[in-house]
């Protein structure tokens, strides 16, 4: 799996979610981080909205899940379980 994460330095929810992601995303998943303010080309490419953080999960080249906003550790665990079966 590939995880593309969009965050911003000013985003408090992004800081919270970084800790949650560290605890819930499998270690073998590829993670790519972009800053919403500094990587506008990528923001447009991926169609990222104005609510942060935004995470897009891919299986191969196919987008399988888009997660927008702050979620609890339990919610993220359930999302990972849903994806991995």
Image (cartoon, grey):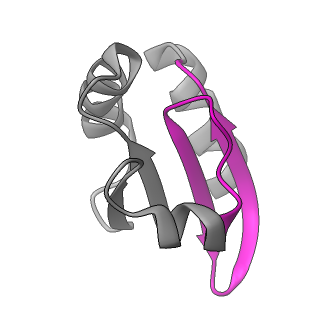
Q: Nearer the viewer, residue 21 or 16?
A: 16
Residue 23 appears in the rendering: yes
For residue 58, side relative to residue 20 (left or right)? right
Q: Residue furthest bottom?
A: 61
What's the residue at 38%, 36% (across, down)? 24
Q: Which residues are magenta?
A: 46-70
Looking at the image, residue 31 lies above or below residue 81: below
For residue 37, side relative to residue 15 (left or right)? right
For residue 60, side relative to residue 71 (left or right)? right
Rendering coords of residue 80 (x, y %): 57, 43
Rendering coords of residue 35 (x, y %): 33, 52
What's the residue at 44%, 18% (across, down)? 73
Looking at the image, residue 7 lies above or below residue 83: above
What's the residue at 49%, 33% (across, down)? 53
Residue 1 appears in the rendering: no
Q: Nearer the viewer, residue 20 or 50?
A: 50
For residue 64, side relative to residue 16 (left or right)? right
Tally the numbered discs: 0
Rendering coords of residue 51 (x, y %): 61, 29
What's the residue at 68%, 53% (across, down)? 83
Q: Say if the magenta span includes residue 49.
A: yes
Rendering coords of residue 84 (x, y %): 62, 56
Tell me the quarter of the picture where residue 27 sits.
bottom left
């Amino acid at each position: 799996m590939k995880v593309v994460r969009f965050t911003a330095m000013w985003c408090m929810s992004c800081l919270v979610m970084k800790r949650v992601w560290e605890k819930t995303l499998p270690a073998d998943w590829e993670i790519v981080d972009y800053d919403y303010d500094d990587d506008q080309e990528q923001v447009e490419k991926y169609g990222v909205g104005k609510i942060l953080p935004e995470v897009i999960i891919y299986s191969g080249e196919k987008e399988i899940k888009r997660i927008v906003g702050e979620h609890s550790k339990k919610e993220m665990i359930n999302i990972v379980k849903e994806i991995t079966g």
